[in-house]
Amino acid sequence: MDMNTITIIGMGLIGSSLARRIREVGFFDKVIAVDNSLDVCKKVEELAIADEVTHKLEESVKDADMVMLSVPVGVIGKVAQRVIPYMKKDSVLTDAGSVKAAVIEAVKPFCRPGIHFVPGHPIAGTEFSGPESGLSELFEGRWCILTPMPDVSARAIEQVTRLWESCGSRVDIMDVKHHDLVLGITSHLPHLIAYTIVGTANDLADDIKSEVIKYSASGFRDFTRIAASDPTMWRDVFLNNKEAVLEILQRFNEDLTAMQRAIRKEDGEYLYQYFGKTRAIRKAIVDIGQA
Ligand code: NAP
């Protein structure tokens, strides 16, 4: 399987970061950038981060050895339906979607023999979107999780692994459901909490709201950064990882109730022990260089 050309569909934060990195390291000879927005296409041309830029989906994949879908989770299936019939035999289809089970369900009906589908998820990002926000070093030192189905060719998995390694990532293979549960707790729940806290502050009376903004450095500011993330992307994540998010939210609510009770009962020992455990998690994250 020679890897000469990659078509990247969706030139936002993830797609444009990948394009930048691939051009830097030369993992593919040719990068074809695709977006349904003409404004995005124009921007990508101005940034000169791809060899070809187009909004014509079907045509863009004909010569590609690998096709990367970096569009919001809710449209990955629709885009796959349009491009798979035009992909050449023995080419690799992959994606960057933050949810895996729903994406696989959406893409599977359109897969056909000779097209090797390797679902993926780079655990890297920022609160920004669009091609201007991309960074060639975005994936450096970060994990990328692949959730291939059992019958997919080992060669295709290896090609996708090598792509992410060339971006500076470490690659892990994971069971699909496990991925959605793990990411539900490490990424989706924190975003939900941040959106809710900032939303609650926004609903406060105007006089309090101005002081919330003024004194935000006391903790609120970190939540506002996460809550500034792209609304389309996150709407799609929650709607497509519904079961795992609701399951984790149930656990979270139980823990929150225990916390409420400890404060009401002035159970300082409970709070002290709990905060000690959470501090250890932070230390572990810093120790493995993921802070
Ligand atoms: P983004 O910055 O919003 O970019 C998505 C791009 O896809 C936009 O330019 C969008 O154009 C385009 N698009 C939407 N529908 C399309 C279609 N049908 N055909 C062609 N292009 C289309 O999003 P992103 O942050 O790069 O996220 C891309 C994917 O990576 C998502 O699946 C997300 O879950 C995943 N991911 C994101 C992060 C993160 O932190 N951002 C991290 C890991 C994985 P319009 O804006 O005009 O619709």
Image (tube, grey):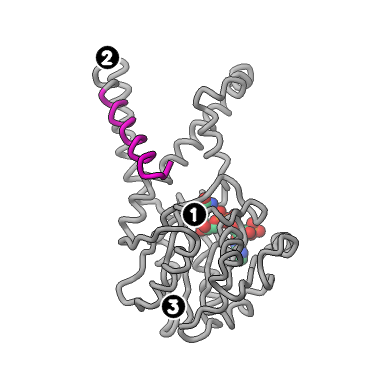
| Numbered disc total | 3
Q: Which segment did they paint magenta?
A: 273-291
Name the disc covering residue 111, or none. Answer: 3
Label 1 or label 2, whichever comes before in sequence order: 1
Secondary structure of residue under mark 1: loop
Q: Horizontally, is 40 left or right of 197 in the view?
A: right
Q: Could you say which quadrant of the image residue 147 lies in?
A: bottom left
Residue at the spot of label 1: 140
Label 2 or label 3, whichever comes before in sequence order: 3
| Amino acid identity at mark 1 | Glu
User: Which of labels 1 and 3 is toward the front?
Assistant: 1
Q: Give yes or no for residue 97 being in the magenta stretch.
A: no
Q: Nearer the viewer, residue 195 or 144?
A: 144
At label 2, counting other C-alpha atoms closer than 10 Å, the crowd grade (few under 14, some 14-19, many 20 or more) is few
Residue at the farthest front position: 25
Check contact, mark 2 vs mark 3: CB within 8 A.
no
Does residue 95 lie above or below 273 as drawn? Answer: below
Q: Is mark 1 within 8 Å of ligand 1?
A: no
| Amino acid identity at mark 2 | Lys
Residue at the farthest top position: 266
| Amino acid identity at mark 3 | Cys
